Amino acid sequence: MNKILSIAFFLGGIVSASAQNLQLHYDFGKSVYRFGPGSQENRPRLTSTVEMFRPDRWGSTFFFVDMNYGSKSGDGGVLGAYWEISRNLRFWEFPVSVHVEYNGGLDVEGPEGGSGTYDDAWLAGPEWSCASADLSRTFSLAIMYKAIPRNMKNVHNFQITAVWSMMFWKNRLTFCGFADFWMENRPWQLTDASGRDGTDFIFMSEPQIWYNFNTIKGMEDVGLSIGSEVEISSNFVDAGFFAIPTLAVKWTF
């Protein structure tokens, strides 16, 4: 969900349109990991995502907001929210920009009902981008310093982020996603009975596949896409490896 774009990144000398979309994902994590260590019994069933990407003469702006809906209290209300906003700055032709970003959110399922999973974070570093001539394939790679002020062990960390988008079968299908690898100490993720203070390294990737209805004759102005996402992670939702699929719909404005 987070960081996924439906169009090319803004590159020097290439004109790219803005994009906004709304996604709704039905999450199968509760069913796939229902029992045993790492049980996701309290994982929300639904997640909505709002994304916006807009280029301008100085670079581009991107943000998304995730909201998780569940039934911990039986009311099906919002159980958590998370957002990221980033700005790419570039005043030159070389395809490397200055990337600055903020992440933050709240999760009522977190430790003590607080924001355990979503500590505020500030990121900055270089980002390299490339695209095919027709913009049907794009890729970016960012290497960033990551400050997590509320982390009790390591305030100073790093993050490497890759983002891609590929359109094929005459643009009927879009394969897109991101992969993050970062450093963040999580003492609550104990790895064994010895009491070690959890993990310092986290990986997460969310590849998505979409079928785009605007490629059907007579439906060119319909922004509907139907698809799926798999949240692949290590030491993110809990200690260890997880692969959690979703069934999703998206409307691109």
Image (cartoon, rainbow, N blue to C red):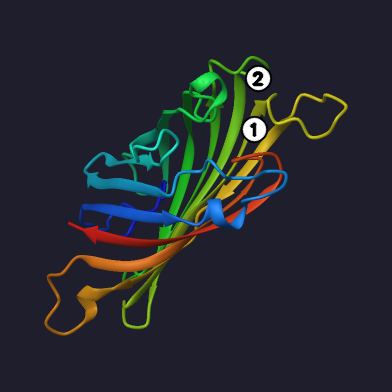
Q: Label 1 neighbourhood size at 10 Å, few (<14), some (14-19), many (20+)?
A: many
Residue 81 image point, x, y percent? 38, 34
Using the image as rendered, state which of residue 202 and residue 25 is in the foreground. Answer: 25
Residue 179 higher or lower than 135, as above or below:
above
Q: Label 2 neighbourhood size at 10 Å, few (<14), some (14-19), many (20+)?
A: some
Residue 123 image point, x, y percent? 48, 29
- Residue at (72%, 47%) from the top-left corner? 36
> In this rendering, does residue 214 appear at all?
yes
Query: In the visual, does 201 lie left or right of 131?
Result: right
- According to the image, label 2 marks what residue? 154
- Residue at (62%, 51%) from the top-left corner? 34
What secondary structure is found at the residue carrying circle 1?
strand
Kind of residue at badge 1: Met
Using the image as rendered, state which of residue 52 and residue 74 is in the foreground. Answer: 74
Using the image as rendered, state which of residue 109 and residue 90 is in the foreground. Answer: 109
Kind of residue at badge 2: Asn
Using the image as rendered, state which of residue 236 and residue 207 is in the foreground. Answer: 236
Residue 64 image point, x, y percent? 33, 42
Give residue 183's mark: 1
Question: Residues at badges 1 and 2 in contact (C-beta under 8 Å)?
Answer: yes
Which of the 4 image quadrants contains residue 232? bottom right
- Residue at (61%, 27%) from the top-left corner? 157
C-alpha distance separating marks 1 and 2: 9 Å
What secondary structure is found at the residue carrying circle 2?
loop
Query: In the visual, does 218 lie left or right of 6?
Result: left
Residue 152 higher or lower than 171, as above or below:
above
- Residue at (62%, 52%) from the top-left corner? 33
> In this rendering, does residue 82 appear at all?
no
Query: In the visual, does 2 lie left or right of 14?
Result: right
Which of the 4 image quadrants contains residue 26? bottom left
Residue 101 image point, x, y percent? 41, 32
